[in-house]
Structures are given as structure tokens and as C-alpha cells.
Image (cartoon, rainbow, N blue to C red):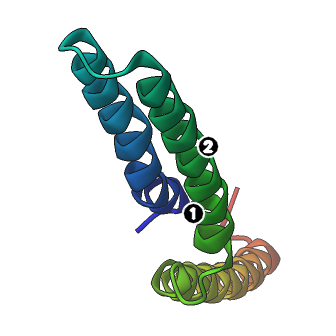
Amino acid sequence: MSRRSNHLLMLAPSIVLGLGVTVAALFAIRSGFSSILGTIIIVLSLLIAGVLGVVGIGLSSELPGIDTEEDERLKTLRAAQRAMIEEMDEMIEILGEIRDTLKSTGESD
């Protein structure tokens, strides 16, 4: 799972709380609920949603082991590429020796 999706997962409750409670409180105020109490509920829900969002982002960046699989795959891929480059360097050296040998025998232009 990527870091961006982890952030979104941790932010989802705060988004739902911030939007859901606000919309519900506005609907209740329209239906005759006390506007002062509704405003207090909206402000509190937005504050709590903000705190949840900040804590969620902080926790998602501190969670161990989230990207370990990707890190291991990346390390494996890098090691494989290093090995291939080393093998190609050896092939280049061998091909250079073959070229030199052919040049010394006069079979190459």
C-alpha cells in the first residue's frame, strides 16, 4: 500500500466526521433545531475532525512496516540490476579480448 493511500485512509474518518456531522446539524437546524446548539455542534465536529486528521497523518507516517514489502522488492530489483550490469561488464571485457585477438590474427577489418 502506498504512502498516499495510507494518508487517505487515516484522513477518511475526519472527512466523514467533518462533512457528515456538519450536514446533519445544518439539516437539523433547518428542521427547527436550536441554531446556537447546532452551531456549537458544527464547530466542535470540525475541530475534532481537524485533530483526527492531524493525528491520522502523524500516525500514518510513523507506522512501521507499511512499505517494507515495497522496500524489499526495490532492494531485490536493485541487486538484480547490479548483477546484470556486472555480467554485462564482464561480457564487454570478453568481447574486447575477442576483438583484440581477431585484430592480431588479421581476420577482422
- Residue bearing mark 2: 47
Residue at 64% over, 54% down: 51
Residue at 54% over, 89% down: 65
Relative image position of residue 31 (x, y in whole percent):
18, 14
Residue at 47% over, 63% down: 6
Of residue 74 and residue 94, the one placed in the foreground of this image is: 74
Relative image position of residue 62 (x, y in whole percent):
68, 78
Front: mark 2 or 1: 2
Question: Where is 78 relative to 60, above or below?
Answer: below
- Residue bearing mark 1: 56
Choose top left, top right, bottom left or bottom right for residue 97: bottom right
Tell me which amino acid carries mark 2: Leu
The N terminus: image quadrant: bottom left
Tell me which amino acid carries mark 1: Gly
Residue at 49% over, 42% down: 45
In the picture, measured across the screen, residue 26 lies left or right of residue 86, that is left
Mark 2 to mark 1 CA distance (whole Å): 14 Å
Question: Where is 87 relative to 50, above or below?
Answer: below
Question: Where is 60 relative to 28, above or below?
Answer: below
Q: Does dot 2 land on a helix, a strand or a loop?
A: helix
Choose top left, top right, bottom left or bottom right for residue 25: top left
Q: Does dot 1 land on a helix, a strand or a loop?
A: helix
Q: Residues within 10 Å of mark 1 (few under 14, many from 20)?
A: many
Q: Earlier in the sequence, mark 2 or mark 1?
A: 2
